[in-house]
Amino acid sequence: MAAPLHVVTGALGYTGRALTARLLAAGHRVRTLTNSPGRPNPFGPALEIHPLAFGDPGALCRSLEGAAVLHNTYWVRFDHRLFTFAGAVRDTKALFAAAARAGVGRIVHVSILHADEADDLGYYRGKHELEDALRASGLPHSIVRPGVLFGRGDILVNNIAWVLRHLPLFGVFGDGGYALRPLFVDDMAALMAAQAQRTGNSTVDAVGPERFTYLELVRALRAILGVRRPIVRVPPWLGHAAGRLLNPFVGDVVITREEIAGLVRGLLDSEAAAAGPTALSEWARAERATLGKRYASEVRRRTVRDRDYAAI
């Protein structure tokens, strides 16, 4: 009997790559739907590659035929001239509709912590709309809600380290007392793989074993990296303005006003049990020789589609 087929959006990217490695190790067949078929493929012929054909409903449906589970990691981090929240919502709804037509057995969908509590922020509003759409679809599903993920190729933790290494000071927004619970990307993959085996519908927060205030996180990374940088408290508007000044130099959007708002409101924290055992502090110590040496660009990852995701 053939092994179950799992379809993963973005298996050559970040979360999807970690999930694909776990699924293949467990003996599953894996097909990816990707906008970057030219990226280096670390899985070789074990990974079946199809285009993420949002604009072709028939092709999208065919690419999902035979799938026991669809794992959806597709999203965008901010509105940009090349990609928008509205477009990501539209395209993800098309993906859900194609999954229903193709008879996919279950969807494991990546959302965000507190997706239904911040509709004034475009990122959260879009995630909330997609959660509602998935529940309304009637498809068996699990909604997995991470806050901050870390690990090979992450952006937030890496770029905090990059600022600590390369700039003369680090500014935290407001008092820095708002909390977050980062989750290791491989632990996120394990959680998604476990949710694929469930029956019925579920919504689960995906958080790690350590809780930091933002100020504590920056101080911990500074100590691990062994750098001497003053950490100063700045009003959120000033922190955003400083980020915008950096944008042209790194060719990216360093941080958005909405990301700062979500962070300061504590939307990256949860009281849920830890979804995995890996501590950020231990991982960062093991990776300190390379952590933050290179800036990780969201825009380049969306536009440079023939290089390894973690190297951009």
Image (spheres, rainbow, N blue to C red):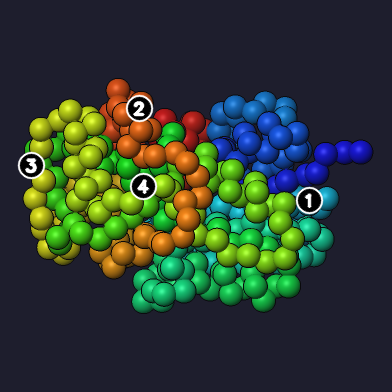
Pair 3/1: label in front: 3
Which residue occupies 68% across, 58% down?
Answer: 107
In this rendered view, identify the residue nearer to me: 46 or 195: 195
Q: Earlier in the sequence, mark 3 or mark 2?
A: 3
* Residue projecting furthest to the front: 273
Image coords of residue 192 (percent x, y): 61, 49
Instruction: Work out whether mark 3 precedes mark 1 in sequence or the reverse, and give the earlier one.
Output: 1
Residue pointed to by mark 2:
287
According to the image, label 4 marks what residue? 210
Residue in view at x 31 percent, y 64 percent: 266
Q: Give the quarter of the image for residue 166.
A: top left
Residue 19: give x, y in percent of width and height. Answer: 60, 41
Measured in 3D between alpha carbons, the distance from the residue under mark 1 to the one under mark 2, in whole angstroms, is: 36 Å
Q: Are marks 1 and 2 in contact (CB under 8 Å)?
A: no
From the image, tell me which residue sits under label 3. 230
How packed is label 4: few (under 14 Cα within 10 Å), some, or many (20 or more)?
A: some
Quarter holding residue 151: top left
Q: Amino acid at mark 3?
A: Pro
Quickly name the residue at label 1. 67
- Name the amino acid type tagged 2: Glu
Q: Nearer the viewer, residue 248 or 258?
A: 258
Decide: is 290 above or below 250. above
Q: Residues within 10 Å of mark 1 (few under 14, many from 20)?
A: many
What kind of element bears circle 4? Answer: loop
Element under disc 1: loop
Q: Amino acid at mark 4?
A: Glu
Q: Nearer the viewer, mark 3 or mark 4?
A: 4
Q: Are marks 3 and 4 in contact (CB under 8 Å)?
A: no
